[in-house]
Amino acid sequence: MRVVLAFVAGLVFGLGLLLSGMADPAKVPGFLDLAGAWDPSLAFVMAGAIAVGALAFALARRRTKALLGDPMQLPTATAIDRRLVVGSLVFGAGWGLAGFCPGPALVALGLGAPQAVVFVVAMLAGMGLFELIEARRKG
Amino acid sequence: MTVAWTSFTPWTALAGGLLIGLAAALLVLFNGRIAGISGIVGGLLRPLRGDIAWRAAFVAGLVIAPLAWLAFGALPRLHVAAGTPTLVAAGLLVGIGTRYGSGCTSGHGVCGLSRGSLRSLAATAAFMAAGFVTVFVARHLLGH
């Protein structure tokens, strides 16, 4: 059941990305281009998502268990450290460069875009590199 | 700054956002998990017993979404301006950056801000700022 639910959540997430237009990597630079002709669409996507999300997380916070019985696993980290900030800056540079972030890139993969294949393979390589570095660091 | 009225799509953006919020709501309320794409995918590269199937199912849902979309209408056309070297560089930066930063647009931007997390607000401000600077340099200084 939890696998079915995760699939449905992924599907709804993907449909949301398609409906919002965010699956198209041209939409993102449109938002990030403050100095040019600015397309505020992405802010509206965030507003819609946060409106529903805020409600859901307010309910989730009051529970110790999720509806299917698993423990509620909300993030506990609060530190704003160098890893968080530098990592996010690096992510933002890549995001601005191609207009893809992880979710839309996976949807674009499903659309059969060959550029999405290149991006996703490189992204997985980047994530794999992180795992290797972390494994070595922890030795 | 001028607004690009021809490409601005407020209603579909808002409606799509509501769906994204609904997806995050389903995953946290039923499964107790955060709908952060980079975290869900990253977890597949560090497989733990009993923690793989739901991640794979979520990713499958995302990838299959365009197929389900066909029930409603024609698929949107994508406009990818970046060439292969740029896509490779961007993919690597996004992969490494989201894992060090513990999240991306969905995990920090949607779920974190919905939770009122200051840590996610800092992350979102950082990746947005880097995105603004990158696009400014690429479009206005280098003229791509």
Image (tube, rainbow, N blue to C red):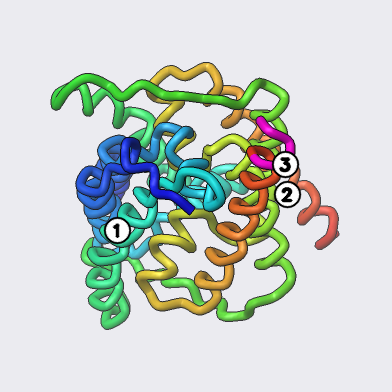
**In the rendered image, the vertical position of residue B109 relative to residue B47, given as above or below:** below
Outermost left residue? B72
Both labels 2 and 3 in a single chain: no
- Residue type at mark 2 is Phe
Determine the main secondary structure of the stretch shown in magenta. loop
Q: Estimate the spatial distance between the alpha carbons at disc 2 and disc 3, rounded to whole Å.
A: 31 Å
Residue B48 appears in the figure: no
Q: Which residue position holds label 3? A: B141
Residue matched to label 2: A130
Extreme residue in the front direction: B2
The residue closer to the viewer here, B8 or B125, is B8
How packed mark 2 is, by other alpha carbons closer than 10 Å (few <14, some 14-19, many 20 or more), is many
Q: Is residue A50 left or right of residue B96?
A: left
Chain identifier of the residue bearing label 2 in the image: A
Circle 3 residues within 10 Å: few <14, some 14–19, many ≥20: few
Q: Tell me the SS state at disc 3.
A: helix
The residue shown at (73%, 36%) is: B142
Q: Select label 2 or label 3 by which is in front.
A: 3
